[in-house]
Amino acid sequence: MKQLQAFTNPKTNLPIVSHFINGELTLGTSQKTSPIYNPSAGEIIAETALGTVSDVDAAVQAAKSSFHPWQNVSALKRARYFFELKSLLEKNKEKLAAIISREHGKVLSDALGEVQRGIEVIEYACAAPQLLKGDFSHSISTGIDCYDMRKPLGVCVGITPFNFPAMVGMWMFPLALACGNTFILKPSEKDPSVSLLLAQLVKEAGFPDGVFNIVQGDKVVVDALLTHPDVAAVSFVGSTPIAHYIYETASKHGKRVQALGGAKNHCVVMPDADLKSAVSGIMGAAYGSAGERCMAISVAVVVGEETANKLIAGLKEEISKLHIGASDDHASEMGPLITAEHRANVVRLIESGIKQKADLVVDGRHVMVKGHEKGFFLGASLFDHVKPEMEIYQKEIFGPVLCVVRVKTLDEAVNLINQNPYANGAAIYTQSGSAARYYAAKIDAGMVGINIPIPVPLAFHTFGGNKNSMFGGHHMYGEEAIRFYTRLQTITARWDLPEVAKKQHFVMPTM
Ligand code: NAD
């Protein structure tokens, strides 16, 4: 299959990441672009085409015209496209990961993990015929049967964040398409290149043109999608203020919406915890991907002074061994942050922690990576004796900063966590089954990990939080996605017409 025609900006000589509409790459109607950085080098490497209202309209028209034929393709045949896509994704795993790593800054092995978790949703979509089966009740009354159908909604939209430029889109479009919808993806403008390789592979897998489209851009594109009369549903993942805005605006315009927001994930460490695994689990969960994960552990809530002292000592030692480096260096365990602006914001929050008298045990602000002096690197920072009223506790930092809060009992930990306005993930390290069971029952969080620091459910379960971490009724992927991307229709049928059915009845029918 031939490569789709890519574009270059003649003024800057940089590649332009374009839209993908009706099976073709297009620059759309605007000349405007925004820069894409390689965060390890701190240099601009490409530009994102910023779409317009008319680009959105072109994508919606393409998705709308392909909706009718696509929904009439049998679920079994739709599933076969996903088998083909899965095999193409497997073949292109390394390529996809390299693009992600170069623009996002996460290390290659982490980017590969991201691709793998996306592929798992494609595998789930291969079960479309099974997933779309409805319930059937035979003879609910004499000669009457009742059954359900799950019908697609129409044109669905996905708006995604920078931190998982491939995976989050893959949480959405495979199941939307498997259900018979068509789709428009709006990736983050900060690292959109991987979306075009996904588009190339979708085309190569044989999906009809117009079934999957991409419009690149910013708020202009988002607003046009949220208000377009021919868009039926919106899936969003990003920060809480924008998730809330998306939920309100799209709902007001009659769309079905699921909007996942930010997080402040806590991990309780009990006095009986296996401290070695707590330290290594929290290290990966707090500093992996430079803390730019919505399931990152940003607060360790430690029960008892002695446990806290031991945990801090263990973390300090591991942080001193952490290898920070360019994302394409195989030795790197942690790469840079996404932009200089985001780095500056994380540094400002560290300074706020110092000002508010948290105890900065490890200061990551002065890390330098040799040969990458302009890169957006920050080392791992560790705060002890953090109090709930401090800004570093209240805000989502989204960087490599871990706050330790010391408490006396498990109940104190649970109360603290349940008062937090975010409720995405929560974890506990303990060797007590009853403490773990008590925690899981009492804690208000969408996903709970027991001796697992990042409890991201697999594709056949579902992903989503509570409170300010999610607006809308359905979680991402798994059976929840089938519910989100379909409208239920229930049919009550009588074929065998007895005399009684030919008479007029004015009372509510009962069986
Ligand atoms: P973001 O909210 O800034 O951007 C997300 C998307 O919204 C992007 O496509 C962006 O172009 C668009 N957008 C940004 N500002 C907008 C505006 N004013 N109007 C309309 N659209 C706008 O988020 P981000 O910085 O890309 O990603 C990081 C955030 O995402 C963090 O808060 C993180 O916790 C969250 N996140 C949550 C989950 C989850 O599952 N809950 C998963 C990943 C990331």
Image: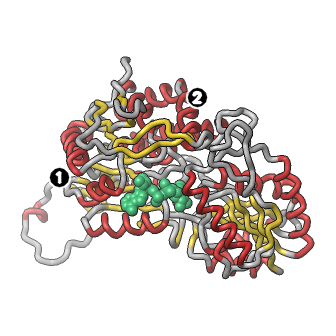
Near-viewer residue (47 or 506): 47
Amino acid type indicated by mark 1: Asp
- Residue ID at (11%, 73%): 505
The residue tagged 1 is 496
Asked whether, in this view, residue 396 is left or right of residue 497, the answer is: right
Give the residue type at disc 2: Glu
Q: Quadrant of the C terminus?
A: bottom left
**Measured from the top left, where is residue 35 in percent x and y?**
44, 44
The residue at the point 38 percent across, 21 percent down is 3
Mark 1: secondary structure: loop
Tag shown at residue 41 = none
Q: CA distance from mark 2 to mark 1?
A: 59 Å
Asked if residue 28 can be seen in this view, the reply is yes
Residue at coordinates 50% horizontally, 50% vertically from top-left? 162
Earlier-in-chain disc, 2 versus 1? 2
Q: Is residue 23 above or below residue 447?
A: above
Residue displayed at 48% across by 66% down: 240
Along the line of sight, the residue nearer the viewer: 316 or 240: 316
**Residue that label 2 marks:** 94
**Image quadrant containing the N terminus:** top left
Q: Is residue 488 visible to the viewer in this orientation of the structure?
A: no
Residue 204 x/y as whole percent: 38, 24
